[in-house]
Amino acid sequence: MPPTTDNSREVRPQRQRNRAGCATGCLTIVVLLLLVVGAGWIFLLRPYLHNIAETQIDNALTAGVQQIPTTLPALPTGITLPPVPITDNAINNLFVLSLAPNDPIKNPSAQITPDGISISFQAYGLGNGISLKPAAQNGHLVATNVGITGPFSLIMSPDELTPLLNRHLADAQNRIKYSIQSVQLKDHEMDLMLGNAQT
């Protein structure tokens, strides 16, 4: 008997890949990657970088405040003190004294204008800026209208920077032991009108 062949096997036609299905799969992978990167930024990288930046700024401001003399003379009641001028050169000199050569913040430069104080600096080679308007509120010097530009704004917001600045302004005011009655901003100079001596 001749051998029989089994023709019962069905040949299945190969499925053709659908372009829409391929695009959907690629889009799903891209969306998942974006979610993973976004979660990594929010929960890991940003808090880490924020902590480093906050520590650097805190250390620099603490060192700057330590440079302020504490031996201002006490004056009798009723005598008005002349305005205390603070120039942008004085602020820049505080930066030089406060930052170590190996700090990631480089080339800080302050400029005082009638509109406020702007500070430009480089962090890891990238240009950044902080702007603020000093004001006297209830005898205290405070930073208002704080703004941040550059990549630094990704790791610290103005709402996070303002309390840090105000804490150090309060420390500086405690060193001079006088209340601040008013602040006048001019080109390259900020004049502080001092009030009564604090106890």
Image (cartoon, rainbow, N blue to C red):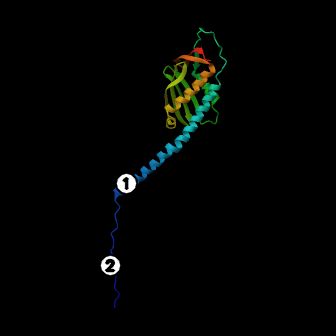
Residue linked to disc 1? 24
Q: Earlier in the sequence, mark 2 or mark 1?
A: 2
Point 58% across, 27% down: residue: 168
Q: Which residue is depicted at the point 58% across and 24% down?
A: 170
- The one nearer the camera, 7 or 63, is 63
Residue 18 percent coordinates (x, y)? 34, 59
Residue 122 in the image: x percent, y percent?
56, 34
In the rendered image, residue 49, in percent from the top left (x then y), is placed at 55, 40
Residue designated by label 2: 8
Above or below, 35 relative to 8: above
Image x and y of residue 167, in percent: 57, 27
- The correct choice, above or below, for 186 with respect to 22 in the image is above
Q: Nearer the viewer, residue 151 or 136?
A: 136
Q: Residue furthest top?
A: 78
Q: Give the quarter of the figure containing the C terminus.
A: top right
Q: Dot 2: few (<14), some (14–19), or many (≥20) neighbours within 10 Å?
A: few
